[in-house]
Every structure is written in structure tokens, then in C-alpha cells.
Image (cartoon, helix red, strand yellow):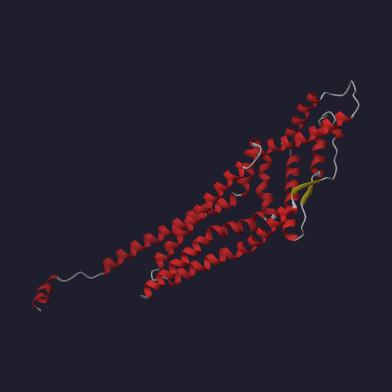
Amino acid sequence: MLTRLRNALSAALIALSCLLVPFGALAAWVTYGLADTGRYLTAMAPLAADPAVQGAVADTVGAGIMREIDHRMDAAPASPTSPEPGTVRPFAQDAVRSFTRTDAFRTAWEAGNRVVHDAVLSALQDGRERAVTVDLAPVTAQIKRRLTRDHVPLAHHIPVEHTEVALLPAHEVHRLRKGYEALEVAGFWLPVSAAVLASAGIAIAACRRRAVTATALGAALGGAFLLLAVAIGRRLTLADLPDPAHRPAAGAVYDALTATLRDVSWLLIALGLTVALICRLTGLLARRRRAGATPAADPAQEPSRARA
């Protein structure tokens, strides 16, 4: 009866610890990965050389520049020397695409990501009810200098104003702040709780080798569940984008940000299966050694035992 009780309690603790594994990994990833500016910039830096990201940035920035150039040309008095809008657009788009392949773009990409990350993180941590905005004037200034150097018509008329670009409305910030505060706590305590529960479950088990095997398989299953969640999240994120042309760029960003989470998932799967296999092999070897150590019955003593 005591053995059954110990096994039942051990199974419950191990099952609970394995259930916490994927959620703990997810919370830790948000708290110590996405929320860390250095790690965030390290993950985003290679995307400056990604063709899909370069194309999306060039299309977005080029469209904004052309809107401003068209506005300037409409407001200015007609002149025989004024270029036609149709002739300016290819030059502007080519110049912006060329800019995305320079070291200056990589510098601007890092600066822009740092500004955005700092603004969002500050809004989540300071507790004030306000919208998240950023000033992209420094990035615009770099693009303007490049276009002017390339002699793009009307490039010198592009305004470099300190306008606030909205990232998140105030009500979204309030909702995200609550989630972030919960994840800050969960990012530390969920992994610790999973480790404590697993250790307790193994310690009270009647057969500890079997308990370790169950824990390892549960951790591997948690890693597989986490990997599946990342894949489903990617599909849903890309499906919600209004512009299908920018999905490759958004997919590259999603993959870069979740790379650590995928690595942790595969590590849980590999480590769990390896430990389970080792426990299985050591169990087989132990049974073989016990079978070899059992003394064989003496045939000469069998008749005397039968007469007795």
C-alpha cells in the first residue's frame, strides 16, 4: 500500500513538472531573451542582410519618400525643368534599395531597432498610461543624405522632422504590461518549480530509475509541444498580415526572434530521449547482472528434497 502511494504521488509530481517545462521555457524566453536589449539586437542584426527584409524596408521607406516628393511637386509651381513623377519614382526606389545594401543601412537598422525596443520596454516598465511612439528622424536623415549624394531629384526636399511615429496605443500598452509583469515572475519561478517538482517526484519514487525515465520522456514531450507551438504561432502571425508581399520579411523576423526558443525545444527533446535511453540500457544491464549472480539449483539435492 505504501509503495502504491509513493508511486502515485511521484507520478503526479513528475507529470506536473513536465507540464510546466514548455510554459517555463516560453516565459524565460520572453523575460531573458526578448526583454534584453543586447540579445534582441543580436538576434535582429543579421536581418539587415536578409533580402526579404531589405525589400520590405525599401518598399515601405520608398513609398513614404515618394508620397512626400509627390506632395512637394503638387504644391510647387509648375516649371519646365521640373521632373515628372513617373521619372522620379524609379530613381528613388533604386536609391533606397541600394541604400539597404550598405553599411549605413546596417547602422540605421540597429539604431532603429534599439529605439523601438527601448521605447516598448520603457512603456512596459514605467507604469504610465501612454502610447508608445518613436522618433525616426535620424534614420530619415541618413536616407536623405544617401539619396542626395546619389543625385536623386528633389531628394534634398525630403523633410527630416522630429515626428512621433505611433507603435502601440495606450490601451494595448496596458494589456501588454499586465502580461509582461506576469511573465517576469513566471520566467524565474516556473523553471525552478519544474526542477523542484521533478526532483521530489524522483526522490519519493519506489523505483527511481523508472521515475527518471518518465521525467526525461516528459521533458522531451514538453520540448516537442513547445516546438509545435512555435510553428503554429508562426503560421498564425503570418496569416494575420494585411500585405502578403511582406510575409517573407515577417517570417524572417519571427524566425530570428524565436531561434533561441527552437534551440531550447530541440535541446529538451534530445536530452530527454538520451536520458531515457540511458536509463533503459542501465536497467537492462542491471537485470542481466542480477540474473547472472543468482546461484543455479544443485541437481544432486533435488531427490533428497523430494523424499523429504
In the figure, 61 relative to 217: above or below? Answer: above
Towards the viewer: 44 or 25: 25
Q: In this image, 180 relative to 196: left or right?
A: right
The residue at the point 79 percent across, 38 percent down is 143
Location of residue 185 by image quarter: bottom right
Q: Residue at x 67, y 60 (%)?
A: 178
The part of the image, by quadrant, that contains residue 29 is: bottom right
Give the residue at x 56% y 50%. 262
Residue 19 visible in image: yes
Residue 19 picture location, percent across and down: 50, 60
Q: Position of residue 30 (x, y in %)?
A: 63, 56
Locate the N terminus and report the quarter of the image it occupies.
bottom left
Q: Quadrant of residue 286?
A: bottom left
Q: Residue furthest bottom?
A: 308
**Vertical placement of residue 36 versus 83, above or below:** below
Residue pictured at 72% horizontal, 47% vertical? 113
Residue 141 lies, in percent from the top left, at 82, 40
Find residue 171 and report its horizontal and vertical position in percent.
72, 54
- Identify the image quadrant of the C terminus: bottom left
Whether residue 86 is situated above or below residue 97 in the rendered picture: above
